[in-house]
Amino acid sequence: TDPCPGGNLAPGGGEDIVLSAPCSAGAGTFHYGNVNIVDGGSLTFQDQTIDFWAKNILVENGGSLVAGSPGTPIGAAGGIVTIQLYGADQGPGGTGVACQSDASCGVPAAIWNSNGANKVCLPPDAPDTPPGQCRVYDYFYTYEPLAADNGAADRYFGYKVLGVSFGGTLQLYGKKGASYGNLEASNSGTSWVRLAQTVKAGESTLLLDREVDWEAGDWIVLTTTDYLPGHSERLEIEQVAADRKTLTLKQPVKYVHNGEAFPLTSLPDRLKLGGATAETRAAVGLLTRSIRIVSAGDSFDPAKATCDYDCFPPADQLFPSTEQPGQQHPYYFGGHTVIRQGAKEVKIQGVEFYQLGQGGRIGHYPVHFHHARRTPPDTLVQDNSIHDSMTRWITLHGAQQVTLARNVGYLSIGHGFYLEDGTETDNKLYSNLGVLARAAVDNAQNPRKVPGILSAASIPGGLASPFFAYQSDVVHPTVFWAMNGWNDFESNMAAGATACGACYWPVLGSISGHSRHMTWESYASIQAGLARGGTAPIKKFKGNFCSSAMNSFNSTPDSAVCHGVEDGSLRLNAVPNPLAPAPNTDKSQESYYPIVSQTLPAYTRCDGASTDCSAVPVCSASNRQACMVTVLDRYTSSFHWAETNFSAIWLRPRWFLMLKSVLTDVQNAGLTFVTGGDYTHSSVIPGNWMLARQNVFIGHAQNAVDPATQAVLN
């Protein structure tokens, strides 16, 4: 039966369909199993109220999945498009969705069979464009199944998935909270804004710093402005005033949230910070969007055919464990997205990702560029929300040239915005807001008891230090985690990391995971091998913000002891993850965890976009011309409590510049420069310097409430 008679999609009854011609979905509820969109096929959602249930949606070579356009995004005519991904956990060895083009998912044979032997022309210009005219000219590697989904060798996307393969097009444009046009990197648009005045506990009116397009019934997150990461609040709007800046909430706030920027008018002219105030106000992020991709349970539920925030089984309902037969746990098997190498076009804007991710499973994330390598230069993910995730928010895995802008992440398990393997370069992270990176522990903030991915049960004897990466989803959840620094980090805000977490952690990693077996160029190749971890310099770190985490910015894998997780009577117990293997005692053979063998960075210069940087001599006393300066420019950070011999911002061992920044409300040390770490001259490179210039250090930045007292009382 034709699933799309007359070009209009039928409602369906749970069957699998293959779309090979243009097809449109209008108002109503649709129910399908696998939806494959192949060459010549397209599925276009109209700007109407649509609920689209599917086990899997796979966009193959020549296929397109479209909702809205930049000129007429979904929501402009009042529509809301909801995609509900459903399906049961098959357990280890599950079988992913099958491609319908062919066994190689429509990838031309010459490209598929090249498998890294030589460079090929990739979409959008593949396969016949001359190499000099290709916008993406790179090595291609054959697809493999995702971890835990290896029941069949030719299933490359897992299941309960929205996937985009070689030559596939994904265009999702929603209106609410999205800004179309060119915005400065520092402009968060209406995706997230700031308070314009302080709101006290028990109050239910918010005044924002700009006009927004939000509406009654929308959900927002109001960020913490004290020492407790969990004081960020999810709130529902009851009314938006005519000025478009005053919100009335359906329920009062529980905690004080600062809305007063700290005045700097009394500073001497020599500081010249470029502004009259320090930006210490709470952020307000929009969670509701015009396009929604949400996780449902094991099967289509007619009683919940139009669900949005209640598609998932409740947190207090137990289900049999597929990893440990005979055991039970709450439901955390959500949907996920996978964009693979060779995708022709990916533009995701104004989309809400709710309860996505498959708890404890590496490679199953709400938004996931999986070994995408060099993407088309206009690849973007912006003005979206990702909340109540079962894993990360957005993962770039061996991906380059992706723009992540103005996204709002709220409630991750472990790390939030995640650059995974150490080969992620030339990406742009602009004005993203990350709120509450949760430790994968058994507490009230993790009601589903979701395990972390980097959650080893123990550290085996004989394993060389450092050890922090193996249990980092439990001990050190980090809002922005980067295994390679050669990316632009501008105007992002991290608000809250629990346990002994951090806002920003440029990890001193070597190339890890499957990326170890691929050929890379420029700064993506510089960290090849155990001895070269931490050599990729930080390209740009400017105008970023941090609040409410033990660590603000840590340049090494060191950390103070995490009391309450690693020892102590008031213990936060990790949620066990049977899928997390024991670390390999031979780090060079580690395939699951990030490979971190270095304890100090050696940021090294390497010129040329096509240069093999893995052979470039590393920054050292005998090779000072290769050393790079790390600049923290206009960084604002507040509410930290690093203990003992550590500080909120920990910079070690050479050539750091902290410029025109603001550091406030720190317990213990705020900023520390460390050279060799001992008293020997040989530990220091000649000419080494570290400089803090034109910065402001503020002991107490709020007048409305004592943040320390609020933390104690709540």
Image (spheres, rainbow, N blue to C red):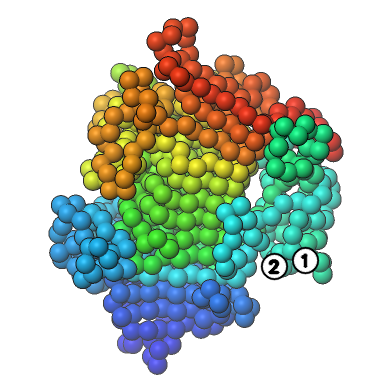
134 lies above or below 274 = below
- The mark found on residue 628 in the picture is none
Q: Please give left or right for residue 535 compared with residue 214 in the image.
A: left
In the picture of the structure, the residue carrying the numbered disc 2 is 213
Residue position for label 1:
244
Residue lying furthest top: 679
Residue 581 placed where, x, y %? 33, 35
- Give the position of the C terminus as an image quadrant: top right
Name the kind of residue labelled 1 in the image: Arg
Q: Which residue lies at the image location 79% right of the left edge and 52% below the top edge?
A: 196
> For the residue labelled by badge 1, is the local secondary structure a helix, a strand or a loop?
loop
Badge 2: residue crowd in 10 Å (few <14, some 14–19, many ≥20) = some
Q: Is residue 174 above or below residue 287?
A: below
Marks 1 and 2 sit apart, C-alpha to C-alpha, by: 7 Å
Q: Is residue 2 visible to us here?
A: yes
For residue 313, say whether it is visible. no
Dot placed on the residue nearer the N-terminal end, 1 or 2: 2
In the rendered image, residue 280, in percent from the top left (x then y), is placed at 72, 41
Q: What residue type is disc 2 on?
A: Asp
Q: Position of residue 699 (x, y in %)?
A: 75, 27
Q: Nearer the viewer, residue 579 or 362?
A: 362
Point out the image quarter for the N terminus: bottom left
Check the image and report above or below for 361 versus 156: above
Q: How many marks?
A: 2
